Image: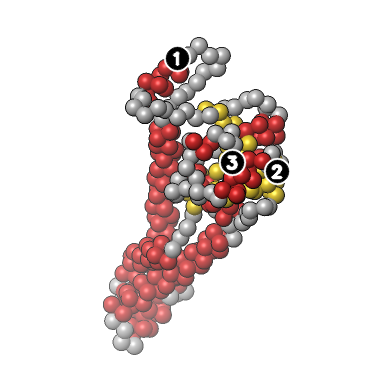
Amino acid sequence: MPIKLLMTSCQSASDIIAMHGVDKDLFVRFRDYDVPAASLEAFRIDKSGALVGNMIARRYGWKVGQKVVLQELDGISFNINGIFTTDGSADDFLILAGRRFLQEAVKEQGISNRVMIRLRPGSDADAVAENIDALPMAIKTTTQREETFMSASIDQLRDMVTISRIVIVVIIAVILIAMGNAISMTTLERTREFGILRTLGFKRGAILGMVVSEGTIQALVGAVIGSAIVQAIISANLIKTVSTCGITITLTAGTGVWLVGIGIICLGGLIGSLTPAWRASRLEIVTAIAHDE
């Protein structure tokens, strides 16, 4: 089955929009989508009709019967005849339109850039792929299993996760340095205050606990504010998904994720304030009171 694939750039958008121009009668032999029969029939007879995956419909708030104009794809407009669901695959983010309709919309009549092949039972997929690529055609083809293509996309997502983890580690290191510097400046300015507290009977451990508590509370406040801002961005759909050229995943964050993140930042604030807290607790009373602010 020839497919006209049209999508936003994989390099410039986190929310990739992908449209597949398919044969309206043939595609059901290649994909097992859960879509109402009435929607499927409407899709077949409507030249400008489309079926959309439930996840992309949810992302943009699309409804059946709505006319959509995609400025991201050169202003292509289509009617939503139905919303389909899969078993949780990446197809839930696809938009299916008629192949000829999509080719005409981008003025590339008769041109497809992907072909899907259904093998007979018992066929050797690798051998078939080699035979196809060996055919004397005017264009070079790259034939591979669908699982291989998806695996490559998953590897891209795995790389994104790895980079994200590195960024998180760097952020935590910056928090440690920033908290240490901020608490150090604060304790230096409050040297006489610590000396007076010592004369009033405060033990070294109490001073240490006071400074560490302040550092941890500052980190907690910053973490809560930062988490609230990020949650607001996600809730407002300013950042919806993370995508590669083959897979799209939805950004969601439950209570557990936020609690873990806040806990890690608080731990960073606690560790960052330990050194200045130790120094403050070891100040000599006379030296501290005589300190010139």
Q: Position of residue 127 (x, y in %)?
A: 37, 20
Choose between 200 and 146: the one closer to the eye.
Answer: 146
Q: Which colour assignment does the render follow?
A: secondary structure
* Residue at 53% across, 46% down: 93
Q: Quickly name the residue at label 2.
A: 77
Q: From the image, state whether disc 1 or disc 3 is nearer to you.
A: 3
**Mark toward the viewer: 2 or 3:** 3
Q: In the image, is residue 36 above or below residue 274? A: above
Number of numbered discs: 3
C-beta proximity under 8 Å, tags 2 and 3: no
| Helix, strand or loop for disc 3 | strand
Tell me the residue that label 1 is attached to: 134
Task: Say what amino acid the circle numbered 1 marks.
Answer: Ala
**Crowdedness near tag 1: few (<14), some (14–19) or many (≥20) residues, C-alpha within 10 Å:** few
Q: Is residue 38 above or below residue 126?
A: below
Which amino acid is tagged 2?
Ser
Q: Position of residue 202 (x, y in %)?
A: 31, 84
**Residue at the image point whose x is 66% and y is 43% from the top:** 49
What whole-number distance in Å separates the C-alpha atoms at marks 1 and 3?
Answer: 30 Å
What residue is pinned by disc 3? 96
Give the distance between the C-alpha atoms of the residues marked 2 and 3, in whole angstroms. Answer: 13 Å
Residue 82 as seen in the image, left or right of residue 248: right
Q: Could you say which quadrant of the image residue 232 lies in?
A: bottom right
Where in the figure is residue 284, as x and y percent of width and height? Answer: 31, 76
Q: Is residue 141 visible?
A: yes
Is 231 in front, or is 279?
231
Mark 1 / mark 3, whichever is N-terminal:
3
Question: Is 39 placed above or below 262 here?
Answer: above
* Marked residue nearer the N-terminal end (1 or 2): 2
Q: Are marks 1 and 3 in contact (CB under 8 Å)?
A: no
